[in-house]
Image (spheres, rainbow, N blue to C red):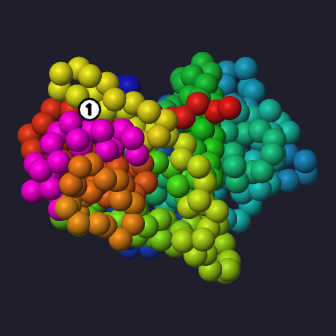
């Protein structure tokens, strides 16, 4: 885009902002004369030429404030102007008129806010591509958007309609992502995804706390209640089916010498790796994992030592990573998805 056009329009928007702050546009007529017309002139439209900028354009017995036309007199843009603060009035009709008249771009403005619609069928609110705020937004960014959608030569060549279609497709994808992310989060909470648990454990350890897997599960159950239903029955994480489901992953550990220790039973991998590292060394750094006395639950006896295996696979992976860091051992710990039957 030409820098002088961008500069001129940015300066004009700055002036409009000042007048908006002082409430110098008391009605719709003032918005049209003081805001819309000057913007159109800067963007190359021949305001005053009734063959190019048609005012009070008749559609279905109603009138649209502006119909912007190319040299063959075909309308390409509809603009409806409202008084400041009344932008929500008439947007449905504007978008529907544009759809029935096969107009690619519809614009609704109250002078302060400008809404750009990609005309088409369906819910008119979903056709909204971009909304600008001339009073609260960045003047140069607003100018760039206006130039993208409303510059005379770009509208006549079809560049603007192609741009708004492309932006509309992007908006649709963004809306789909926003719609699906809560669903994905709910699934992770329901499944108690091993990778999610491991991430929470490791991040907690970085912050200086060491939660048990049961504590994390209890926390996630609380999140699940908030996301899925504000008033569901309470869930006991100790008895919930979610905490009793079969593990969906197992441990694979690659030792510093290249030896790979892997088994569908992660308890075997966990205890084998600790034995290889050295029970005495691990006990010095992690007395809650290796001890010469019995643990309350989950004891695996190795000679005169007991290894605490009362934790899930993400916790086992986190513990092994922690041990390797404390002892300065180079090894790779992975959670591998189990094969489905």
Q: What element carries label 1?
A: strand
Task: Assess whether residue 86 is covered by the magenta stretch.
Answer: no
- In the rendered image, the quadrant that contains the C terminus is top right
Taking the image as shown, residue 326 lies to the left or right of residue 60, namely: left
The magenta stretch is 267-287
Residue 279 lies, with reference to residue 85, above or below; the image says above
How many labels were placed on the picture? Answer: 1
Say which residue label 1 marks: 332
* Nearer to us in this view, 28 or 178: 178
* Residue 32 appears in view: no
Taking the image as shown, residue 81 lies to the left or right of residue 202, namely: right
Residue 161 lies, with reference to residue 129, above or below; the image says above
Q: Which residue sits at x=60%, y=38%?
A: 173
Q: Is the magenta stretch mostly helix, strand or loop?
A: helix
Q: Position of residue 176 (x, y in %)?
A: 63, 44
Q: Which residue sits at x=59%, y=59%?
A: 244
Residue 43 lies, with reference to residue 184, above or below; the image says above
Taking the image as shown, residue 35 lies to the left or right of residue 279, namely: right
Q: Position of residue 194 (x, y in %)?
A: 46, 48
Q: Give the quarter of the image for residue 33.
A: bottom right
Residue 10 lies, with reference to residue 15, above or below; the image says above
């Amino acid at each position: 885009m030409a820098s002088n056009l961008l500069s001129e329009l940015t300066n004009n928007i700055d002036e409009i902002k000042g007048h908006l702050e002082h409430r110098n546009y008391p009605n719709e007529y003032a918005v049209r004369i003081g805001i819309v017309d000057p913007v159109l002139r800067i963007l190359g439209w021949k305001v005053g030429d009734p063959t190019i900028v048609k005012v009070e354009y008749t559609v279905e017995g109603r009138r649209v404030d502006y119909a912007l036309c190319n040299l063959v007199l075909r309308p390409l843009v509809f603009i409806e102007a409202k008084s400041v603060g009344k932008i929500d009035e008439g947007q449905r009709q504007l978008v529907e008129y544009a759809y029935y008249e096969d107009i690619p771009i519809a614009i609704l403005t109250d002078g302060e806010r400008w809404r750009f619609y990609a005309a088409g069928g369906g819910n008119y609110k979903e056709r909204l591509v971009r909304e600008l705020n001339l009073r609260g937004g960045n003047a140069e960014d607003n100018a760039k958007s206006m130039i993208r959608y409303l510059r005379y030569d770009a509208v006549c060549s079809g560049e603007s309609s192609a741009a708004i279609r492309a932006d509309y497709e992007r908006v649709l994808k963004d809306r789909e992502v926003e719609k699906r992310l809560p669903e994905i989060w709910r699934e992770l909470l329901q499944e108690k995804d091993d990778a999610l648990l491991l991430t929470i454990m490791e991040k907690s350890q970085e912050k200086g706390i060491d939660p048990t897997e049961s504590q994390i599960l209890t926390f996630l159950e609380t999140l699940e209640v908030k996301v899925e239903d504000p008033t569901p029955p309470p869930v006991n994480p100790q008895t919930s089916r979610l905490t009793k489901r079969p593990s969906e992953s197992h441990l694979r550990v690659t030792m510093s010498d290249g030896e790979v220790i892997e088994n569908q039973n992660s308890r075997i991998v966990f205890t084998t790796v600790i034995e290889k590292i050295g029970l005495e060394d691990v006990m010095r750094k992690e007395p809650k994992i290796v001890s010469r006395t019995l643990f309350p639950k989950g004891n695996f006896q190795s000679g005169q030592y007991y290894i605490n295996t009362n934790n899930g696979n993400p916790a086992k992976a986190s513990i092994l990573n922690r041990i390797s860091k404390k002892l300065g051992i180079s090894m790779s710990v992975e959670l591998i998805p189990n094969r489905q039957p």
